[in-house]
């Protein structure tokens, strides 16, 4: 499942809150520093994926005539080319592998900046970060479903894609995350 750049802050918040609530991790410079560092690392990963996908789109556009002539499934081709190019971008296709690697990068970043202290193994802390990311991803779909239901129940119908719709969606989304303790 694709994570949008807009989700980087929410993931960072979730990681920071979970680390803060942990009995075995101490935040040395506060929540904001952990959020900032985590978001920076998550954004770098997302930008790397976007660069990879942009290259895949360019390649498919270069061969558009052949793809149409052969009635090829563009989504499947996209997936196959992305998988083939992923090693060149140091990108892991498997979500579990990707989030595991991302968790490790976040842990290393937090340690390097001396933002956390702990007396347990790094694996345990990395596991907590991994669980935070996974739980956010799982919660994301439930939150989005609740927000969409609330928008549908409005008397005045909002048109998806409009600025007004995006503003209302974002506000409701953040309220739902806040209610779940993710912000």
Image (cartoon, rainbow, N blue to C red):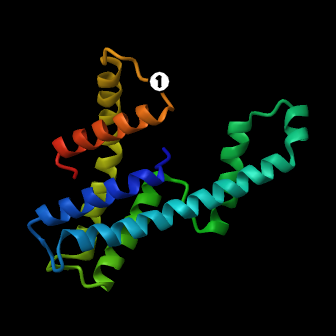
- In the rendered image, residue 159, in percent from the top left (x then y), is placed at 47, 24
CA neighbours of label 1 inside 10 A, class few (<14), some (14 to 19), many (20+): few
Q: Nearer the viewer, residue 163 or 49?
A: 163
- Front one among 128 and 44: 44
User: In the image, is residue 2 above or below residue 8?
Assistant: above
Looking at the rendered structure, the number of numbered marks drawn on it comes to: 1
In this rendering, the answer to whether 8 lies above or below 76 is below
Q: Give me the residue at 28% from left, 66% from top.
A: 35
Residue at the (79%, 47%) spot, across then down: 60
Q: Where in the figure is residue 134, as x and y percent of width and height?
A: 33, 51
Q: Image check: 74 left or right of 68? A: left
Q: Which percent across, then down, holds residue 79?
A: 66, 45
Picture residue at 85% right of the left edge, 38% below the top: 67
Locate residue 119: give its quadrant: bottom left
Instruction: Using the image as rendered, state which of residue 124 and residue 168 is in the foreground.
Output: 168
Residue toward you, 66 or 123: 66
Residue assigned mark 1: 159
Q: Against 42, is 121 above or below?
A: below
Q: Secondary structure at mark 1?
A: loop
**Position of residue 93 in the picture relative to residue 22 (left or right):** right
Image-based side of 173 in relation to 163, left or right = left
Q: Residue at x 70, y 45 (%)?
A: 78
Q: Quadrant of residue 107?
A: bottom left
């Amino acid at each position: 499942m694709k994570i949008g750049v807009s989700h980087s802050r929410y993931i960072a918040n979730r990681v920071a809150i979970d680390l803060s609530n942990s009995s075995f991790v101490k935040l040395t410079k506060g929540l904001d520093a952990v959020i900032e560092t985590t978001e920076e690392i998550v954004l770098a990963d997302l930008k790397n994926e976007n660069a990879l996908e942009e290259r895949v789109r360019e390649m498919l556009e270069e061969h558009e005539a052949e793809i149409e002539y052969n009635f090829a499934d563009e989504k499947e081709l996209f997936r196959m080319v992305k998988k083939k190019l992923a090693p060149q971008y140091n990108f892991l296709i498997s979500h579990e592998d990707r989030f595991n690697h991302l968790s490790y990068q976040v842990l290393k970043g937090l340690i390097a900046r001396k933002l956390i202290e702990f007396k347990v193994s790094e694996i345990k802390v990395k596991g907590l970060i991994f669980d935070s990311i996974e739980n956010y991803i799982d919660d994301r779909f439930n939150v989005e479903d609740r927000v969409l239901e609330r928008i549908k129940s409005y008397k005045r119908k909002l048109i998806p894609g409009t600025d007004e719709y995006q503003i209302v969606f974002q506000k409701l989304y953040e309220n739902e995350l806040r209610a779940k303790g993710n912000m």
